[in-house]
């Protein structure tokens, strides 16, 4: 049996969370190595690009969050076999990486500079991407982003929308999704209510 | 038969070139819509995020370069069927997107600011990523990045290494690859000599 170790920050979000969810849904046993943010300077030294998540596959270190999510998603049955449906799935994931990159670019800021950058993101790119995501969802039936079933695209959007709504990002209004793309909130609630996902988070609430 | 239209800048490089190569190698007919850089402000208005390449699949507009490259790579037989080999292929593509993002961040600069940013890139991240790519190549037999055969990872590295060597990026030394990761130059020459690729570029030289 393949041994998996996923290394990521100890919180329910970010670039590592979709892979954790996919591994859980697929019933794939893995070492869920979580570390506090304060350990990041040390943890990143053991990575080729100073980034997490990483996945060890039978001891081999692999990087790049979407590559990791796609791989475990494939093993978990959460990635389309049809090439065109896979394209739709990948497009959503790529668009979310655009947004992640824009958000990460604000992480070094503070004070008024952070506030201005975040407000500009909320009014500009975030609004554009959220509206586009809502359009993609609606264009493909309204329930899922691709393949008419749960895929890693749904997991990645779910994690993203939850983090916006939770107010994890200072100066991003927590009602932004509801105002700009309410269908994404309905999608988020449906994904959260999926038995395997509800069960996953219930583990941590004990 | 599916109708494809690829929209990208009129040059042999960048985020659109791997998809062009894959479509050609796979013998997939496509409209190769090329536009001059001066038309970009107009072209981008017709895209959801102001980005190219885009692919129209039977008239449906799709974005995100790696998603597009993976899709046409899949159709062209240039993407691994095995999940782990696909992971290695995707990891290389993701790492190159990291580098693309760092390079694109310097495109708005000029004068000394551009020079400093590019020199810092060359000495820092570019050296790190090139050395890592060389390590990946060597760890998997030295000929290809994944699956012991030509995949879209090879195409993307090939396009990237060629653009560095061609001096398209001011202040990036054209001997950087040769100094840091000479095995990537050997790889680049082998890929260029692949009959389908040599034939592709010969078309333009006529």
Image (cartoon, coloured by chain):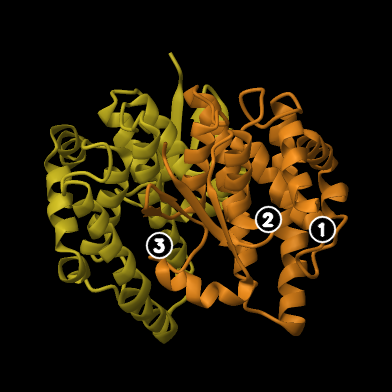
Chain colours: A orange, B yellow
Residue linked to disc 3: B99
Chain letter for the residue marked with disc 1 in the picture: A
Q: Quadrant of the N terminus of chain B?
A: top left
- The reply, left or right, for residue A127 in relation to residue B164 is right
- The reply, left or right, for residue A130 in relation to residue B45 is right
Task: Work out how far the residue at label 3 is from the one at label 1, CA to CA, in angstroms.
Answer: 31 Å
Helix, strand or loop at label 1? It is: loop
Which residue occupies the foreground of this view, B170 or B95? B95
Mark 3 or 1, closer to the camera: 1
The location of residue B129, given as percent across then percent down, is 33, 64
Q: Residue furthest top?
A: B1
Helix, strand or loop at label 2? It is: loop
Disc 2 to disc 1: CB gap under 8 Å: yes
Mark 3 or 2, closer to the camera: 2
Q: Residue at x 62, y 32 (%)?
A: A151
- The reply, left or right, for residue B70 in relation to residue A84 is left
Which residue occupies the foreground of this view, B162 or B124? B124
Chain letter for the residue marked with disc 2 in the picture: A
Q: Residue furthest bottom?
A: B112
Residue linked to disc 2: A13
Instruction: Decide: is A140 above or below A173.
Output: above
Q: Residue at x 75, y 39 (%)?
A: A199
Instruction: Decide: is B195 above or below B99.
Output: above
Residue linked to disc 1: A166
């Amino acid at each position: 049996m393949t041994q998996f170790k996923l290394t990521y920050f100890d919180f329910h979000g970010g670039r590592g969370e979709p892979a954790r969810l996919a591994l859980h849904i697929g019933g794939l046993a893995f070492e869920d190595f979580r570390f506090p943010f304060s350990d990041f300077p040390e943890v990143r030294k053991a990575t080729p690009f100073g980034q997490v998540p990483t996945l060890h596959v039978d001891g081999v270190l692999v990087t790049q969050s979407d590559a990791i999510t796609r791989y475990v998603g494939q093993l978990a049955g959460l990635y389309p076999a049809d090439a065109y449906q896979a394209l739709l799935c990948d497009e959503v994931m790529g668009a979310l990486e655009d947004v992640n990159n824009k958000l990460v670019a604000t992480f070094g800021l503070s004070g008024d500079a952070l506030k201005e950058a975040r407000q500009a993101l909320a009014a500009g790119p975030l609004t554009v991407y959220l509206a586009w995501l809502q359009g993609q969802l609606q264009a493909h039936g309204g329930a899922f982003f691709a393949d008419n079933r749960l895929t890693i695209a749904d997991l990645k959007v779910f994690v993203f929308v939850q983090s916006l709504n939770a107010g994890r990002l200072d100066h991003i209004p927590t009602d932004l999704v509801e105002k700009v793309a309410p269908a994404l909130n309905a999608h988020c609630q449906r994904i959260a209510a999926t038995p395997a996902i509800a069960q996953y988070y219930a583990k941590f609430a004990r």
